[in-house]
Amino acid sequence: MLEIILAAGWPIYPLIFASVLAIAIIVERFWSLRAEVIAPSGLLDEVKKWIASGSIDKQTCEKLQSISLSGEIFASALNNASFSREVIRESIEESGRAVAHKLEKNLTTLGTIATVSPLLGLLGTVIGMVELFGAFNAAGSGHDVAQFAKGISVALYNTAAGIVVAVPAMICYRYFRGKVDGLIVEIEQQAVALVEFMHGERK
């Protein structure tokens, strides 16, 4: 691996940094976007029980808010339970925007890595080609042959590295975008169900 990095030259270092950053983001998002952490399946039923028993107070809302991201939205609705449905919906929408921002954390960076990595690889390719053509300035010497081989190595290794970094990053970016969208829809549905329950429209 070290030989490949040395053969690829300095243009591969930004790609190495991008790959490390992409791996860190992917691992963090896989850990953070677990459904049981974002929107626990039994949380809505538990909140309904609290409402039915009249055990909703400030401490309960604070506890609910710390449980999960969907709990933050439920807590926002419960904190405004004494107001009209319109006020409750507005508070849910406001909390929902904050939750969506948290769900999308670092995804823009991951998408940027997926987009920029092939361009960094192309930059390395261009630099390799420059070195390659520079070998023709004094054709025939052994030094020029070595320079020619170095130029080819820089061009090919950087092209391959750009693709290797970009493809997994783009796949994971698309996967996480779909997962975030699904989680947002699920949380919205649960929030609507909670509002309807609070107003006696749903059991």
Image: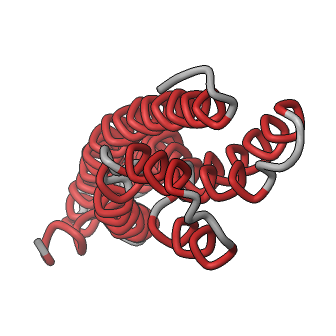
Q: In this view, does 36 lie above or below 188?
A: below
Residue 103 shown left or right of residue 172 in the figure: right
- Seen from this angle, which residue lies furthest front? 53
Quadrant where the N terminus is found in the figure: bottom left
What's the colour scheme? secondary structure
- Residue drawn at point x = 25 percent, y = 45 percent: 164
- Residue drawn at point x = 32 percent, y = 43 percent: 159
Q: Can residue 133 be seen by looking at this rendering?
A: no
- Residue closest to the eye, 51 or 193: 51
Q: In this view, does 31 lie above or below 190?
A: below
Q: How many labels does the image show?
A: 0
Q: Can residue 18 be seen by looking at this rendering?
A: yes
- Seen from this angle, which residue lies furthest top? 201
Relative image position of residue 81 (x, y in whole percent)? 77, 49
- Residue drawn at point x = 88 percent, y = 44 percent: 83
Relative image position of residue 175 (x, y in whole percent)? 34, 35
- Residue closest to the eye, 124 or 67: 67
Quadrant of the rendered image containing residue 12: bottom left
Relative image position of residue 183 (x, y in whole percent)? 44, 37
- Residue drawn at point x = 35 percent, y = 59 percent: 37
- Residue closest to the eye, 139 or 44: 44
Relative image position of residue 78 (x, y in whole percent)? 69, 54
Q: Is residue 61 above or below residue 74?
A: below
- Residue closest to the eye, 56 or 72: 56
